[in-house]
Image (cartoon, rainbow, N blue to C red):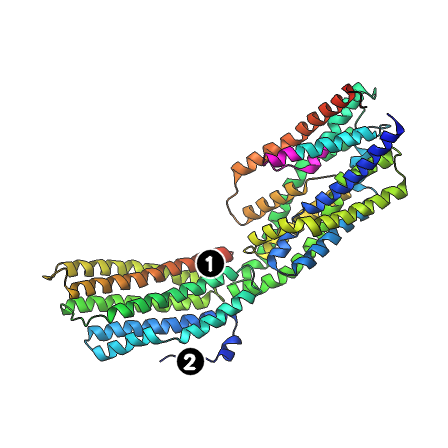
């Protein structure tokens, strides 16, 4: 699903190019995770399991990470080195959260309470796709157009605000089902919504960091 | 005073002047901006900086600031005695040591000139039979004191202007981090030139050491060729000060500057060097640290960043107080030496 890279090929890339590549890989993994949750909604358990397993087991990004880390220490970009490293680590955190989510989702085969619940989760997932994609665009623009990256991050924050409303409504709906609050189904759904919120919050915080970089480095007209 | 003791005092003064030159190098942090950017290797930076400061000191030893401190500041016909020079040195060093222990940032230039004023006033009243009003070249002294106020403010304005011009002409056009990083790579090399330029004028404007030697030359304690020999030794010791002792301060400051942009360092160093150059060419000893602080403020204002006005106010009080306190201390010390019959 994701292209593998030769170490030699990676070593030729610049710090900025490695960051782009890493972000694109993580974004694709995010999409596979979201697609997996959509399969779960459709009760296509086979594909769901395949996607989640892929998110857990894939190591394509590790190669890029290793080359980046070896390059950044010898890099001559003294003044922006720390920020470049932080940016990269924040991308890596997305992978960690996605992996954690995938592991948790595989522990139990869930059956959704009703179609309305499914629909609302799908809407949240659409927003998650949107902000994940926007974040990838924004990270890739850090090297070439900080102002545009800053503006995209503003859109991410706006979308996250909308998402939060949907998430609270979903939680409210969940608590109003006639369901045992200690049941595996309830706990699973509650954790699933919580995990989606965690990933979305990380993306929002990340976008704020990009805005911080824009303010730090850019002299606005 | 016996000739033997007089000779010893002259030797002590020469040794102290050389030690002072060493401490000027040892306290210099101009190189930290350069080391922080990693443009050249640390040892190479120390050698280049040391050569620049030593070169600056030697090349202007024939007059300029050294002449102002060692001769021009005094009234017509008045020359320093060796005891006066010794008291000036002891007093200014004492005040700087007290300031260091109290954690107060002081200017060695202000302290030295303050001590000169205190000693000369005491001398003229109690010993020399000179009218204190004619003991000084008031015009020159006035120029020196005025320059202490004008130089930091000029530093602020020059930095503000240079940064605004660079921003309008170039920095504003940079869009992404890649472009900024590439341009900063070029700024690093220009910064190297600016730091060498700044170091030359730091050395040239550090009149404390050479001023004392010029005083000895003026009162006939040493010959012209001896003066230039000692000036060269002072230059070498300023180099050694940077190479041996300043490395710790520079390393420490440089590690804090790793995050700062070479273009910002360039603006600050260029501005302070311009101010130091003008002051040196006008033979005015000014405080390098005061100029640098105001250059940083100028940059912050240009970047619309916050300025620590409270800290600045506290610093300004110490700066203003340094001159009168050093004068009073030196005056009392000299008076004490007269009382005990040392002079």
The chain ID associated with circle 1 is A
- In the image, A56 versus A5, the foreground residue is A56
Crowding at mark 1 (Cα within 10 Å: few <14, some 14-19, many 20+) = many
* Whether marks 2 and 1 lie on the same chain: yes
Screen quadrant of the N terminus of chain B: top right
Task: Name the residue rendered at 59%, 46% in the picture.
Answer: B296
Quadrant of residue A193 in the image?
Answer: bottom left
The residue range painted magenta reads B97-114
Q: Nearer the viewer, mark 2 or mark 1?
A: 2
Which residue is tagged 2? A4
For mark 2, does the 10 Å Cα neighbourhood hold few (<14), some (14 to 19), or many (20 or more) residues?
few
Magenta residue check for B36: no
Quick one: B259 or A129, which is closer to the camera? B259
| Relative to A103, B285 lies left or right | right
Residue occupying image coordinates x 44% and y 65%: A88
Residue A19 left/right relative to B169 = left
Secondary structure, magenta segment, majority class: helix
Closer-to-camera residue (B33/B339)? B339
User: Which residue is denoted by mark 1 in the rendering?
Assistant: A213
In the picture, measured across the screen, residue B186 lies left or right of residue B208, that is left
Q: Residue A56's spot in the image, x, y percent?
A: 32, 73
The quadrant holding residue A164 is bottom left
- Tell me what residue is drawn at x 44 percent, y 68 percent: A140
Q: Secondary structure at mark 1?
A: helix
Q: State whether residue B38 appears in this view.
A: yes
Residue B248: give x, y in percent of width and height. Answer: 63, 50
If the image is split into quadrants, where does the C terminus of chain B sit?
A: top right
């Amino acid at each position: 699903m994701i292209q593998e890279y030769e170490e030699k090929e990676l070593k030729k890339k610049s710090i900025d190019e490695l960051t782009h590549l890493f972000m694109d890989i993580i974004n694709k993994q995010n999409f596979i995770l979201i697609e997996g949750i959509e399969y779960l909604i459709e009760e296509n358990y086979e594909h769901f399991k395949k996607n989640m397993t892929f998110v857990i087991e894939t190591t394509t990004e590790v190669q890029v990470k290793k080359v980046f880390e070896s390059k950044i220490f010898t890099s001559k970009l003294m003044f922006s080195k720390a920020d470049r490293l932080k940016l990269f680590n924040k991308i890596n955190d997305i992978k960690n959260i996605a992996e954690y989510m995938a592991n948790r989702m595989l522990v139990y085969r869930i059956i959704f309470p009703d179609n309305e619940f499914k629909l609302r989760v799908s809407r949240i997932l659409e927003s998650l796709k949107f902000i994940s994609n926007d974040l990838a665009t924004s990270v890739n623009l850090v090297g070439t157009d900080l102002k545009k990256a800053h503006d995209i991050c503003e859109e991410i924050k706006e979308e996250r605000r909308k998402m939060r409303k949907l998430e609270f409504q979903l939680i409210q709906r969940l608590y109003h089902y006639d369901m045992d609050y200690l049941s595996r189904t309830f706990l699973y759904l509650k954790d699933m919504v919580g995990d989606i919120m965690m990933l979305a919050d990380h993306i929002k915080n990340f976008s704020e960091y990009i805005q911080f970089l824009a303010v730090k480095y850019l002299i606005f007209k | 005073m016996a000739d033997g003791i007089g000779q010893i005092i002259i030797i002590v003064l020469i040794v102290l002047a050389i030690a002072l030159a060493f401490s000027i190098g040892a306290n210099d942090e101009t190189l930290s901006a350069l080391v922080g950017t990693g443009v050249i290797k640390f040892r190479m930076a120390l050698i280049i900086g040391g050569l620049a400061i030593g070169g600056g000191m030697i090349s202007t030893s024939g007059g300029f600031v050294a002449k102002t401190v060692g001769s021009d500041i005094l009234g017509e016909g008045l020359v320093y005695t060796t005891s006066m020079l010794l008291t000036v040195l002891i007093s200014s060093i004492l005040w700087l040591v007290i300031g260091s222990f109290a954690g107060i940032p002081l200017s060695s230039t202000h302290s030295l000139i303050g001590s000169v004023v205190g000693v000369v006033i005491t001398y003229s009243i109690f010993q020399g039979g000179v009218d204190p009003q004619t003991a000084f070249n008031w015009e020159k002294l006035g120029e020196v004191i005025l320059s202490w106020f004008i130089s930091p403010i000029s530093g602020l304005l020059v930095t503000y202007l240079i940064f605004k011009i660079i921003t309008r002409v170039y920095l504003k056009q940079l869009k992404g981090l890649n472009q900024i990083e590439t341009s900063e790579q070029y700024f690093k090399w220009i910064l190297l030139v600016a730091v060498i330029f700044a170091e030359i004028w730091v050395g040239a404007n550090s009149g404390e050491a050479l001023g004392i030697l010029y005083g000895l030359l003026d009162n006939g304690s040493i010959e012209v060729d001896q003066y230039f020999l000692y000036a060269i030794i002072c230059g070498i010791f300023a180099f050694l000060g940077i190479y041996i002792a300043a490395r710790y301060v520079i390393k420490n400051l440089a590690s804090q500057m790793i995050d700062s942009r070479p273009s910002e360092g360039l603006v600050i160093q260029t501005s302070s060097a311009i101010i130091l150059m003008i002051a040196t060419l006008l033979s005015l000893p000014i405080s390098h640290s005061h100029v640098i602080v105001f250059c940083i403020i100028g940059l912050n204002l240009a970047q619309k960043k916050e300025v620590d006005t409270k800290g600045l106010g506290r610093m300004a009080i110490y700066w203003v107080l340094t001159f009168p306190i050093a004068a009073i201390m030196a005056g009392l010390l000299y008076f004490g030496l007269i009382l005990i019959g040392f002079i």
